[in-house]
Image: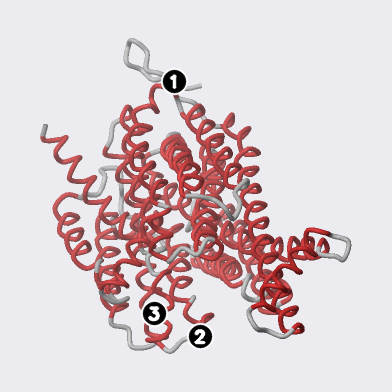
């Protein structure tokens, strides 16, 4: 009983940190327009409030194993929580844009360590037969944090003020600090290593990953490779990442142990985690945009409309954790990929006349699909990793998901913009003198405006503007359909990769778990 109680308190401790870290990747987004006015920033400048946090996350995640080995994992985790909590308060009282960005970078460095370390601690504190349950609990915080972030951020901003999206972290952070001091301990196998750091590898990583993340965040607003800035970032990212990979594979004591990717299950699981990141972040980007821009939902209402997915995940993830030892990873992940492919196919068939239930059911399927994939994938990916390498592997797994998530947002925004232009041009071509439907619509609108008191020329111009508005909305709807279909295809083409994962079967009568 004492061991179970201690395990429960450790779970509460690390999940508290994971939730607030995951929440802060998206909670600020709805408050950016308000922050822009208070901080005197342009649209492009205020985006750095979000970008700087994610960039710092990406930089710190791969080296948490190195820092944990050097300073002790409990000390590293505790310092990370303290830094995150203090800088959350400083973000809330930031006096200008520069101070806000500086504090967000520090907050990101603190918060970026919380999720991978939490995952590693949970893995170690649950026995093999309960690993699926542990990852189900972990998934509740990591996946649902970004999903609930916009809704919570909108509510805090509307009812209080934007600084409260940061101040809300203070009591949670303080509780997490006290719980960490009491319940978290270093594992017995962890030995402090005061070796020389691989400074070259760290430098290449910061340059390569930093440039890649900046390119993904800024590419859409800079028109991608039409911009010298983006071209420079892309070359820097390619060179930096190439040197980083070379250095880490040849160094005797690498800063980031890329040799872990030689493990087939870990490598495949990490890649599928990237697919999960692309689709999850793409949907979190596309759905609010669709609801607000095309259907006219206010920001808070669009957040509520996306709640069915979060509720479905919350309901299903603990169940998946229990199903894991019965069905195995392959069945659950394949089922999740297929369900998500179906749900995004449903979204690709929507029109401007959709009702609430047309959006509700695809999101419920996504909740089940994402829940099945995340829990089973998080469990099986790390199942072949030695405990002494668990923190390193968790950091690598999570940073890939984070970077691929940024790829998902960047690709979604780019494809959406381009397909809007393509479909708008396609529809405009149909509005000709020989198209009876188009001419009848123009004639009817012109007559309506003329009857309202406008002269013939003005009525004709207004009817053309009205038709162009309809064409623009229909073109945008077709663009959303196309991008949703691409996400569905991504899930389908990922299905064969499931066969490369280790599969854990139902326990035999002797209580052993067999793996092929």
In the image, 183 versus 359, the foreground residue is 359
Which residue is at the front of the view, 327 or 125? Answer: 327
Residue with the most extreme left position? 2
Tell me which residue sits at (54%, 31%) in the image: 334
The x, y position of residue 135, in whole percent, is 36, 40
Q: Counting residues from the N terminus, which is met first, the one under dot 1 or under dot 2?
A: 2
Classify 10 Å Cα crowding around label 3: few (below 14), some (14-19), many (20 and above). few
Say which element carries label 2: loop
Return the residue nearer the eye: 498 or 360: 360
Instruction: Determine if residue 166 is in view.
Output: no
- Image position of 312 (left or right of 221): left
Q: CA distance from mark 1 to mark 2?
A: 55 Å
Q: Residues within 10 Å of mark 2 (few under 14, many from 20)?
A: few
Q: What residue is disc 3 on?
A: 34
- Residue 79, image x and y in percent? 26, 65
Mark 2 / mark 3, whichever is N-terminal: 3
Q: Nearer the viewer, mark 2 or mark 3?
A: 3
Q: Are marks 1 and 2 in contact (CB under 8 Å)?
A: no
Q: Quadrant of residue 84?
A: bottom left
Q: Are marks 2 and 3 in contact (CB under 8 Å)?
A: no
What element does badge 1 sit on? loop
Q: Residue at x 61, y 52 (%)?
A: 351
Q: CA distance from mark 3 to mark 1?
A: 52 Å
Which type of secondary structure does the marked residue at label 3 adopt?
helix
Question: To which residue does mark 1 refer?
Answer: 505
Q: Which residue is mark 2?
A: 42
Distance from Cα at disc 2 to Cα at disc 3: 12 Å
Mark 3 and mark 1 residues within 8 Å of each other at the beta carbon = no
Taking 311 as reference, is 204 left or right?
right
């Amino acid at each position: 009983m004492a061991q179970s109680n201690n395990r429960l308190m450790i779970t509460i401790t690390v999940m508290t940190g994971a939730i607030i870290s995951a929440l802060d990747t998206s909670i600020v987004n709805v408050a950016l327009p308000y922050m822009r006015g208070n901080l005197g920033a342009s649209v492009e400048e205020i985006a750095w409030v979000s970008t700087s946090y994610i960039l710092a996350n990406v930089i710190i995640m791969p080296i948490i194993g190195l820092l944990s080995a050097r300073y002790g994992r409990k000390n590293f985790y505790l310092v990370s929580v303290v830094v995150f909590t203090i800088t959350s308060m400083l973000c809330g009282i930031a006096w200008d844009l520069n101070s806000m960005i500086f504090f967000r970078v520090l907050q990101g460095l603190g918060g970026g360590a919380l999720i991978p370390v939490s995952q590693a601690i949970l893995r170690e504190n649950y026995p093999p037969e309960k690993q699926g349950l542990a990852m189900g609990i972990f998934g509740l915080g990591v996946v649902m944090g970004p999903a609930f972030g916009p809704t919570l951020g909108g509510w805090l901003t509307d009812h209080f003020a934007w600084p409260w999206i940061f101040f809300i972290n203070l009591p949670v952070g303080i509780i997490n600090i006290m719980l960490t001091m009491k319940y978290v301990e270093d594992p017995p196998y962890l030995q402090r290593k005061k070796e020389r750091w691989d400074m070259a590898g760290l430098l290449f990583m910061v340059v390569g990953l930093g440039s890649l993340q900046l390119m993904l965040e800024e590419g859409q607003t800079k028109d991608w490779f039409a911009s010298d800035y983006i071209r420079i970032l892309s070359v820097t990212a390619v060179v930096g990442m190439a040197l980083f990979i070379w250095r880490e594979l040849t160094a005797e004591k690498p800063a980031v142990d890329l040799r872990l990717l030689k493990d087939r299950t870990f490598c495949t699981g990490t890649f599928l985690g990237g697919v999960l990141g692309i689709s999850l972040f793409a949907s979190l980007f596309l759905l609010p945009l669709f609801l607000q821009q095309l259907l006219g939902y206010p920001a808070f209402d669009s957040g509520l409309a996306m709640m069915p997915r979060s509720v479905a995940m919350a309901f299903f993830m603990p169940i998946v954790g229990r199903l894991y030892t019965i069905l195995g990873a392959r069945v659950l992940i394949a089922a999740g990929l297929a369900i998500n492919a179906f749900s995004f196919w449903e979204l690709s068939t929507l029109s401007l006349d959709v009702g609430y239930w047309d959006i509700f059911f695809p999101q419920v399927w996504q909740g089940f699909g994402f829940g099945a994939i995340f829990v089973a994938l998080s469990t099986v990916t790390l199942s072949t990793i030695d405990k002494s390498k668990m923190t390193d592997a968790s950091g690598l797994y999570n940073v890939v998901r984070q970077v691929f998530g940024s790829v998902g947002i960047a690709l979604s925004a780019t494809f959406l913009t381009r397909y809007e232009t393509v479909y708008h041009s396609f529809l405009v071509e149909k509005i000709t003198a020989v198209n009876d439907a188009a001419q009848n619509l123009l004639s009817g609108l012109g007559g309506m405006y003329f009857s309202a008191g406008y002269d013939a020329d003005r009525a004709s111009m207004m009817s053309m503007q009205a038709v162009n508005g309809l064409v623009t909305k229909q073109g945008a709807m077709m663009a959303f359909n196309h991008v949703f279909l691409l996400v569905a295809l991504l899930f389908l083409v990922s299905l064969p990769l499931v066969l490369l994962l280790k599969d854990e079967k139902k326990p035999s009568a002797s209580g052993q778990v067999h793996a092929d």
